[in-house]
Amino acid sequence: MSDARDPAADLGESLWIEQPEGTLRVITRGERGTPVLLLSGAGNDNVSLSWRRLIPDLAEHHRVFALDWPKQGGSVPWTGTADHSRMLACIDAVLEHCEVDTVSLVGLSQGGALALAYAIERPERVERIVALAPAGILSFPPVLHQLLWMIARVRLLHRTLPSLVFRSRAACAWFARRALFAGTVDDFDAIVDEYHADVLKHGSGSSDWQNASIGFRRMRVDLRPRLQEISCPALFIQGAEDAGVPSHQSRAAAETVPGARFELVPGSGHWVNRQRPELVNRLIIEFLRQ
């Protein structure tokens, strides 16, 4: 059965930001150092799943803010579509509410894409960015692209069926092994339990951002033509065995950002921050200290 407690309750204090469509929940921790905003991925992700292993370490050196995107974690319920422009506005809302003028952004997958996009659109507000296996830099071959476009347009395919399939914990474990990780994970069972509980509570499927970002012929959100506009220091971290974001595409994106650093983590999948937390935490903390 789904655990009724808030899985992120032990990670910090909850801050609630009222918006026209609903309430954004932000976990805050740390009282000293420069501010850092953590941006999680899509689907059944949230502050706890993405950042459970990072927040305590990061908060020793920084003021940490970790956002539950609309329709995830504590930011439920939410009316309306949380597409690319609305998600960027959510970052604005957090910074304005917390009276933060400039911030470093750390984003995973969908969150990585939005960290990159925010650095492009609001360069005066961003000190540094860390993009872990970022979306927004991908292209797909014909036929596969059209198949993904169709899935994004049909609720039965992107919401109803996934919600039914992943009510099974075994299906969640299979998905985690195939799509999220590559090899062993020290807290695999705990991750699957939390992922499964989130499915039972909120359903499953792709996010509004993912669905709105793909057009029939090409991606509607493709940051690659503008990556050279990023002017702040940037670090890309990529699992070498990522099934969702090919490492060569992430490396190519990093090479487009002036002065960016690229770190490839061997034997790791998409959730490289959960599979190799000690290494990834060290890379992030050392980069933010520079």
Image (spheres, rainbow, N blue to C red):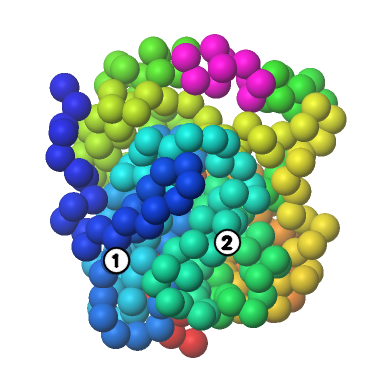
Q: Is residue 224 magenta?
A: no
Residue 282's place in the image compared with 170, above or below, is below
Quick one: SS at disc 1?
Answer: strand
Span of residues in magenta: 151-160
Residue type at numbered disc 1? Thr
Q: Position of residue 263 (x, y in %)?
A: 55, 65
Our reading of the magenta stretch's main secondary structure is helix
Specify the quadrant of the image occupied by residue 176: top left
Marks 1/2 in contact by CB < 8 Å: the verdict is no
Q: Is residue 51 visible?
A: no
Quadrant placement of the N terminus: top left
Q: Residue at x 75, y 27 (%)?
A: 145
Specify the quadrant of the image occupied by residue 16: bottom left
Q: Is residue 152 magenta?
A: yes
Q: Residue at x 29, y 66 (%)?
A: 28
Residue 66's place in the image compared with 110, above or below, is below
Q: Residue at x 49, y 76 (%)?
A: 103
Q: Which residue is mark 2?
A: 115
| Disc 1 from disc 2: Cα separation | 18 Å
Instruction: Describe residue 287's horizontal placement relative to residue 64 as left or right.
Output: right
Q: Position of residue 15 (x, y in %)?
A: 29, 60
Q: Is residue 69 visible?
A: yes
Q: Residue at x 34, y 53 (%)?
A: 25
Q: Residue furthest front?
A: 20
> Could you say which disc has been placed on residue 28 in the image?
1
Residue type at numbered disc 2? Ala
Residue 252's place in the image compared with 205, above or below, is below
Instruction: Describe residue 37's horizontal placement relative to residue 116 as left or right.
Output: left
Q: How many residues crowd mark 2 within 10 Å: few (<14), some (14–19), many (20+)?
A: many
Counting the numbered discs, the total is: 2
Q: Position of residue 118 (x, y in %)?
A: 62, 64
